Image (tube, rainbow, N blue to C red):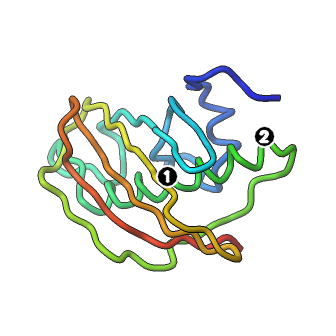
Amino acid sequence: MEKNLPISDKDFIESLIPQRHPFVMVHELTEYSESHLVSGFIIKQENIFVQNGTFQASGLIEHQAQSVALHTGYKYYLLGKEAPTGYIGAIKSFDAEMLPKVGDLLKTEVTILNEVMGVTLVNCITKLNDVVIANSQMKTVVK
């Protein structure tokens, strides 16, 4: 059942997360383990979080949260189950060093720190050209 990584099939990626176009902020799954994931996302001009060619901080947060959802969705896919809907329960911290531009490729690494009764504590690091541009720690909750 496991697919070869990286996975960039748009329909398959979208089947793993609850969001739908135009609100999809991940397009690629490049690494996966039980406690780790790396996602990719190319920023397009028509993205709802783009203002004057710049991807806003709120878009970075949503991209990171969808990367967490992608981890959960792929885990459920491997188990042969339908992916659950999840929500951001709390953002403990978020720092953006810079805001990316249209055409940039974001790579986000999700590390699962703790998972108890549907609540997952994660660390997210987003890079642009191997330089960290944003990081966060958030709790997500599975419905």
Q: Mark 1 points at which residue?
A: 23
Between 129 and 103, the one lying in front of the other is 129
Circle 2 residues within 10 Å: few <14, some 14–19, many ≥20: few
Mark 1 secondary-structure assignment: loop
- Give the number of the mark in front: 1 or 2: 2
Where, quadrant-wise, is the C terminus in this rendering? bottom right
Looking at marks 1 and 2 on the same chain, the residue that comes earlier in the sequence is marked by 1
Please tell me in which quadrant of the rendered image residue 77 appears.
Answer: top right
Between 58 and 109, the one lying in front of the other is 109
Q: Which residue is drawn at 44% across and 79% down?
A: 90
Q: What numbered label is drawn on residue 78? A: 2
Q: Residue at x 32, y 37 (%)?
A: 106
Please tell me in which quadrant of the rendered image residue 83 appears.
Answer: bottom right
Tell whether 94 sits left or right of 40: left
Mark 2 secondary-structure assignment: helix
Q: Could you say where residue 22 lies in the image, as x and y percent from the top left?
A: 50, 48
Q: Could you say where residue 76 lies in the image, as x and y percent from the top left?
A: 76, 49
Check the image and report above or below for 118 versus 59: below
Tell whether 30 sits left or right of 82: left
Residues at marks 1 and 2, CA–CA distance in whole angstroms: 24 Å
**Amino acid at the residue labelled 2:** Leu
Circle 1 residues within 10 Å: few <14, some 14–19, many ≥20: some
